[in-house]
Image (cartoon, rainbow, N blue to C red):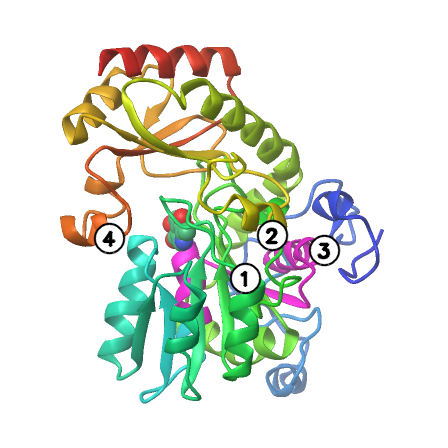
Amino acid sequence: MTTDPRKPLSRASQLIHGGTRRSAYGEMSEAIFLTQGFVYDTAESAQQRFEADDLGDLYIYARYGNPTVAMFEDRMAGYEGAEAGFATASGMAAVNGAVFSQVQAGDHVVASKALFGSCLYIIDTLLRRFGVEVTLVEGTDLQAWRDALSRETKVVFFESPSNPMMEVVDIAAVSELAHAAGACVVVDNVFATPLFQSPLELGADVVVYSATKHIDGQGRCLGGIVLGRKSFIRGDLQTYMKHTGGSMSPFNAWVLLKSLETLELRVRAQSETARILASLIADHPALLSLTYPGRPDHPQAELIARQMKGGSSLITFCLKEGQAGAFRFLNALRLFQITNNLGDAKSLATYPGTTTHQRLSEAERLALGIHPGTVRISCGLEAVDDLGADLNQALSAV
Ligand SMILES: *Cc1c(COP(=O)(O)O)cnc(C)c1O
């Protein structure tokens, strides 16, 4: 049994075995070390542990690290091809840590405009409040990135594909520009999932996930992770996280370890279902437009083919009859559940305008391509025929 994430297990096997630590009992399923802290044999060993630069597989306090959480971190790092990971209480704790641990007043951050509402709050409101300059750019426009980057730029942040309009940023090209300016590139890879996009291979420095989404994929708990070079993860990031308190619970780490065992199976099946459903409804007369990464009519189909290894379990479309049409559609759904999560085994439908992106003004939403008729659906593991029938009957009700 390997416990070293750098040993060359194939990626699929990493998801089952990576990071496993067995206790003296030789348990089959990973143990939950549901403990807040750890005891020391002597006062001297407590002192030594606090003084150690690298604790290895020794622990002090669950806010700093915990064996069950470490299994999740190493399994994710091995799968992503990262040197190290730090697991967080939620996806937002990961985004917050990855950005705030790197900046101080006077620094500059460049981010794409097309961000999830809470990511936008961190970048566009909180950073400014602490004296960090922020430039928001059109993520698809390389010249805009070039113009925005300067020697003061410390961090570049973007989602790709973005939530909910599935706008795709050229990770390799933006990373090259950012590195020329000396900036660290942080990619929120939630929509792509670790299966379908590897930002570190494309040149990014740090990857963040909300594990709440596809990684759990069964609607049970919140979680997140920051992945990157060991010098950053065990350095500034871990220092920031352990002192500000956004660490993952050992119980949630255990739930997520179990989830990783089926991540590939679930995401592949859900994305195949989404591909079929996107084709089924793309030409429906009630729709103004439909966006699905992997379809040849996606505005950045060529970039997607170059940068992504698969499509998505999500489809975003716009109903001709605006919010009234969107609400009629949502209220007519029988199998798809109305909620704001995504990546779940259950199929879900979201109206971003009044939920995930309700903080924005209508003009700001329109600038991001979120129209009054925009609906985002997340395809689950139900039979594709049942889901297709549900979408068709709900579209007819519009
Ligand atoms: C959901 C989401 C987050 C936040 O994750 P939580 O686990 O809900 O805190 C961050 N980024 C994106 C793109 C998301 O979809």
Q: Which residues are magenta?
A: 69-98
Mark 2: amino acid: Gln
Q: Where's residue 33, x and y in %?
A: 60, 54
- Which is in the foreground here, disc 3 or disc 2? 2
Q: Residue at x 19, y 54 (%)?
A: 364
**Residue 80 vertical position relative to residue 259 in the rendered view, above or below:** below
The reply to whether residue 47 is visible in this rendering is: yes
Q: Residue at x 52, y 84 (%)?
A: 182
Tell me how far mark 1 sits from mark 2, CA to CA. Answer: 8 Å
> Taken as a whole, is the magenta stretch helix, strand or loop?
helix
**Residue 240 vertical position relative to residue 209 in the rendered view, above or below:** below
Q: Secondary structure at mark 4?
A: helix
Magenta residue check for 70: yes
- Residue 367 is labelled as 4
Earlier along the polypeptide chain: callout 3 or callout 4?
3
Q: Label 2: which residue?
A: 307
Earlier along the polypeptide chain: callout 3 or callout 1?
3
**Residue 396 vertical position relative to residue 4 in the rendered view, above or below:** above
Dot 1 and dot 2 residues touching (CB under 8 Å): yes
Q: Residue at x 59, y 57 (%)?
A: 69
Q: Label 1: which residue?
A: 171
Earlier along the polypeptide chain: callout 3 or callout 2?
3
Mark 4: amino acid: Ala
**Residue 342 vertical position relative to residue 193 in the rendered view, above or below:** above
Tell me how far mark 3 sits from mark 2, CA to CA. Answer: 28 Å
Q: Label 3: which residue?
A: 19
Tell me how far mark 3 sits from mark 4, CA to CA. Answer: 43 Å
Earlier along the polypeptide chain: callout 4 or callout 1?
1
**CA neighbours of label 2 inside 10 A, class few (<14), some (14 to 19), many (20+):** many
Tell me how far mark 4 sits from mark 1, CA to CA. Answer: 22 Å
Q: Secondary structure at mark 2?
A: helix
